[in-house]
Image (spheres, grey):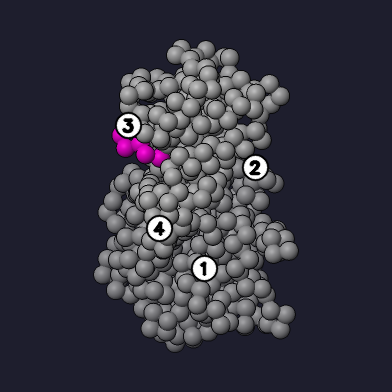
Amino acid sequence: MKEIVTCSQMKALDNHTIKEMGIPSCVLMERAALKCVEEAEKIFGPQESVLVVCGCGNNGGDGIAIARMLHLKGIRTHIFLAGKEESMTEETALQWKIARNYHIPRVNNPQWREYTTIVDAIFGAGLSRPVEGNMKNLIHCMNDSSAKKIAVDIPSGIDGNTGMEMGIAFRADLTVTFGFRKRGLCFYPGRMYAGKTVVADIGIYRTKEQGNAFVVEEHDLRCLPPRRPSGNKGTFGKVLVVAGSEGMCGAAYLSAAAALKAGAGMVQIQTVEANRIPLQILLPEAMVSCTFTEEENSRILSWCDVVVIGPGLGNYGLSYERELWFLKKAGELHKPVILDADGLNLLALRPKWKEYLGEHVVVTPHIGEMSRLTGKTIGEIQNCMAETALSYAEETKTTCVLKDACTVTAGREGSLYLNLSGNEGMATAGSGDVLTGILAAVFCMYLDGEASVSSEIKAALGVYLHGRCGDIAAEKYGSRSLTATNLIEALPEAFCRKEEVLL
């Protein structure tokens, strides 16, 4: 897993590298420029004409150094200075002096059609207010150009922490960011504006205080334990799915089917009588229990290793009774619980039930459900996804999986995992039900002596695997036609690709 940072953390790391480790700022600037040039050359054509648009801060200094290096390679390169020379930082002023010594052309009124590539080095990650006036018009002209577009560190106009557009933002095809990926490059719309993102190592010193936030990548699936040849259906984990009300059989089916396909050895569904026959036809591998008594509930809860509560559970008297009973008793027995969908909606209506949450529970709200749980507006949550998930996990002592285009997994002690797998096709009915089943199966994988792996890491791996299935399904069906069932169908290939990563 690769670290990600906030803007303030990145600034602290820069300062530590410069002041404590003794690497001059101008050296880091040269390294950053070299990395940008390396990546730019990978997309250059045979006859490039490059315009580097530079601000007066250190991001602009990076841009001026890039222009010099391209110029020395014989590539036609011009600089457009988006600001006044007297406003330059010390490091940028030095780069500007060197550029003049090399007679690199400066243009004051760029003819945008002349250039095949535009490099954005205006603001970087340090932007603190909306882009307005001449700067807004400038970025608009840059975006209107048909040239290839490269952003230095982060597209100008994107909030480096939230990914939100601040008035207007540069639309890059490629972003070369330095040291560590910034949070704003993970969240939308920042991730979309960044295009392809390359994280370049320029020698920033890693400190223990830099934070505990990470992005999950494909090679992290190797953390999933191998399936033991000596195992059996009991040792591979038993999942209880408390789900489905009358007319909501599909949610129970999707969650149970995903758990089985993701490797759980046995699955039992606790549901209403009306769902018995459809579920037995749709999923003959699963057991179905429709008796809600103390004795029967105790039996199936003692039998299982992981409990899923919520998909299609409904919002009426029996739904409350079912959730409350299993939530309380699972906690007493220290059984892992995946709480989703109507399980969360019922919790929002009964805030006192929070006392039954704890470290054994994984909550998986989408932003609408999180709004009901916290009282925050959807807009407020979207503007601070990481903080919202972290706050709820800390308050309830749970693992919080806050679902959106970039899903956030937060641990109760402050760890954070951002997911970059998946696509817009997964915004479809039943996708969340599939995730609950996958999460339950992943937790089952760690039953055999893997207690040292935290709940948030297990959840983050499950979230990544779910998104990987979405990417595989989109390759086959396209994002527009993707369904939740396609996600389950993609699990075998997702696991096969995991094995390829191991090799």
Tag 1 residue = 458
Q: Mark 4: give few (<14), some (14-19) or many (20+) Cα within 10 Å.
A: some
Tag 2 residue = 478
Marks 2 and 3 sit apart, C-alpha to C-alpha, by 36 Å
Q: Is residue 383 above or below residue 134?
A: below
Q: Main secondary structure of the magenta part?
A: loop
Dots 2, 4 in contact, CB < 8 A: no
1 or 4: tag closer to the N-terminus: 4
Q: Is residue 274 visible?
A: no
Marks 2 and 1 sit apart, C-alpha to C-alpha, by 29 Å
Dots 3, 1 in contact, CB < 8 A: no
Q: Is residue 444 magenta?
A: no
Q: Is residue 359 left or right of residue 498?
A: left
Say which mark, if any, is on residue 422: none
Name which quarter of the figure residue 146 lies in.
top right
The image shows residue 257 at horizontal and vertical percentages of 61, 65
Q: Is residue 201 above or below residue 140?
A: below
